[in-house]
Image (cartoon, rainbow, N blue to C red):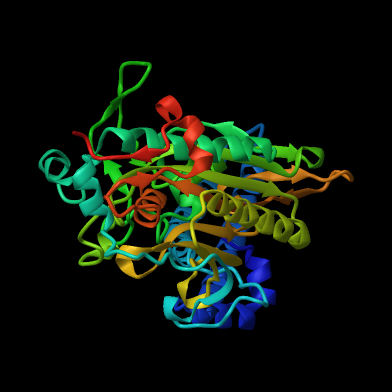
């Protein structure tokens, strides 16, 4: 969410940003509603002041019939205006949450993901002297995943992870956590069941409230019993990444400048309804409803140069993780049409996946500036005592499933076995080097 004064001063730039991000919003209407809102508030304040004056004039004595009549009229007028203000505020807030952040000057202008720009590539697509298999066939032969029983138990996109794949999955998570801790990130295991404000604040709702038709989030239907024994009807949701929980950690707080930047890495289970991906990637494990992930979050001063530096640092860590794993990959700078409303700058990392004969997304790094901080009300006090909203950034270190797909497919051998990347072997039981078919 942006500051309304900033929107007023940068109206044309924000209109251009909305156009470039394919966001249908009427900025002129927003400013008109804001003017109406402020006008109504002024009238209400004036009428309340008159009521106070009227009450003071009757102090020490009984009010006259005329004063009683005037008081009732003022009260009714205030009530009417408050009803109008409530409606106007609702319209105002519904528009405000859709106002986009102006993208960085170096963000490519483009209509959709087809116009993202490759800015870095490491390694070459793996070449085989035999006909390579896809991860599903490999997993079936080695008894690593069970999709049939996964669907039986969990429904569409359900799956079981089995045998050495369990150790490989956990090895990936421990590898990512260890790397980030060494880089100065504070590790956390945050809640995955969260209140509404955490998801709205981090931008995971398309509007002010959860929209089940659009938002790829699972809502928990059952009621919760509070500490007082009463039913709590507040909505709860499952997170799709650790980001909302990590950012909400400081919600409503004012930090000191010397605490910044804050670097956190969070391990969590992730849940995504994938309602917007109907018909996409229906086979295999590329797109699933639940997985594990290690996420990076940074909180910085309101300084674009500092936040840019942190953004690059997070991307470099992800690049290092992919290189340590020996996975061919590339980095894309995301164009305006493929960016979220609040994002200032964004990069994706994609690993080579032979079965797709293409790169597949394994992570995403975004800088939101103060867009999320305003929603979550996270500020810091400067050395001269001034309060400012922090800047917030996030990046995937490693998820579980897609890097596992890339490892299985790129490291497969002619006999159907899979070599385990050397960097992961210390996390595997018995430090095994290869996953082979059971006898």
- Percent across and percent down for residue 286 are 31, 56
Residue located at (58% from left, 35% from top): 178
Horizontally, residue 217 falls left or right of residue 171, namely left
Spot the residue most to the top. Answer: 228
Eyeballing the image, is 266 above or below 273? Answer: above
Spot the residue most to the right. Answer: 384
Eyeballing the image, is 69 above or below 207? Answer: above
- Percent across and percent down for residue 430 are 42, 25
Quadrant for residue 11, please give it: bottom right
Count of labels in the image: 0
Eyeballing the image, is 51 above or below 104? Answer: above
Residue located at (19% from left, 46% from top): 140
Of 226 and 425, nearer the camera is: 425
Of 352 and 23, nearer the camera is: 352
The quarter of the picture where the N terminus appears is bottom right
Eyeballing the image, is 363 above or below 297? Answer: below
Residue located at (32% from left, 38% from top): 165
* Residue 398 visible, this angle: yes
Horizontally, residue 95 falls left or right of residue 280, namely right
Residue located at (34% from left, 56% from top): 409
- Percent across and percent down for residue 106 are 66, 77
- Percent across and percent down for residue 79 are 45, 53
The quarter of the picture where the C terminus appears is top left
């Amino acid at each position: 969410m942006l500051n309304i004064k900033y929107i007023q001063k940068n109206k044309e730039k924000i209109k251009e940003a909305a156009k470039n991000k394919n966001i249908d919003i009427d900025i002129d209407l927003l400013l008109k509603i804001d003017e109406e809102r402020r006008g109504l508030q002024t009238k209400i304040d004036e009428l309340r002041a008159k009521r106070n004056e009227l009450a003071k004039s009757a102090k020490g004595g009984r009010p006259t019939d005329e004063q009683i009549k005037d008081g009732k009229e003022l009260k009714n007028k205030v009530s009417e205006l408050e009803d109008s203000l409530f409606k106007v505020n609702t319209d105002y807030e519904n528009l405000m949450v859709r106002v986009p952040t102006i993208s960085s000057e170096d963000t490519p202008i483009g209509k959709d993901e087809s116009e993202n720009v490759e800015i870095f590539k490491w390694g070459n697509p793996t070449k085989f002297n035999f006909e390579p298999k896809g991860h599903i066939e490999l997993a079936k032969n080695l008894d690593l995943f069970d999709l049939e029983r996964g669907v039986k138990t969990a429904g569409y996109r359900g799956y079981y992870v089995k045998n050495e794949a369990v150790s490989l999955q956990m090895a990936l998570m421990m590898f990512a956590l260890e790397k980030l801790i060494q880089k100065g990130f504070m590790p956390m295991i945050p809640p995955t069941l969260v209140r509404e404000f955490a998801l709205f604040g981090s931008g995971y709702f398309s509007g002010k409230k959860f929209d089940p038709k659009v938002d790829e989030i699972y809502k928990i239907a059952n009621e919760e019993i509070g500490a007082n024994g009463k039913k709590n009807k507040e909505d709860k949701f499952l997170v799709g990444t650790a980001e909302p929980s990590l950012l909400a950690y400081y919600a409503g707080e004012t930090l000191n400048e010397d605490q910044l930047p804050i670097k956190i890495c969070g391990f969590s289970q992730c849940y995504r309804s994938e309602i917007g991906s109907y018909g996409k990637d229906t086979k295999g494990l590329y797109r699933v409803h639940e997985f594990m992930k290690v996420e990076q979050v940074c909180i910085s001063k309101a300084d674009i140069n500092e936040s840019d530096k942190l953004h690059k640092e997070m991307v470099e860590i992800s690049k290092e993780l992919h290189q340590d794993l020996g996975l061919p990959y590339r980095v894309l700078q995301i164009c305006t049409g493929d960016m979220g409303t609040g994002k200032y700058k964004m990069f994706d990392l994609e690993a080579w996946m032979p079965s797709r004969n293409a790169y597949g997304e394994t992570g995403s790094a975004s800088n939101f500036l103060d867009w999320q901080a305003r929603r979550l009300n996270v500020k810091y006090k400067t050395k001269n005592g001034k309060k400012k909203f922090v800047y917030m950034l996030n990046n995937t270190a490693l998820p579980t499933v897609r890097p596992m797909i890339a490892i299985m497919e790129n490291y497969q051998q002619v006999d159907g076995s899979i070599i385990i990347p050397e960097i992961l072997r210390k996390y595997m039981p018995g430090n095994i080097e290869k996953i082979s078919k059971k006898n």
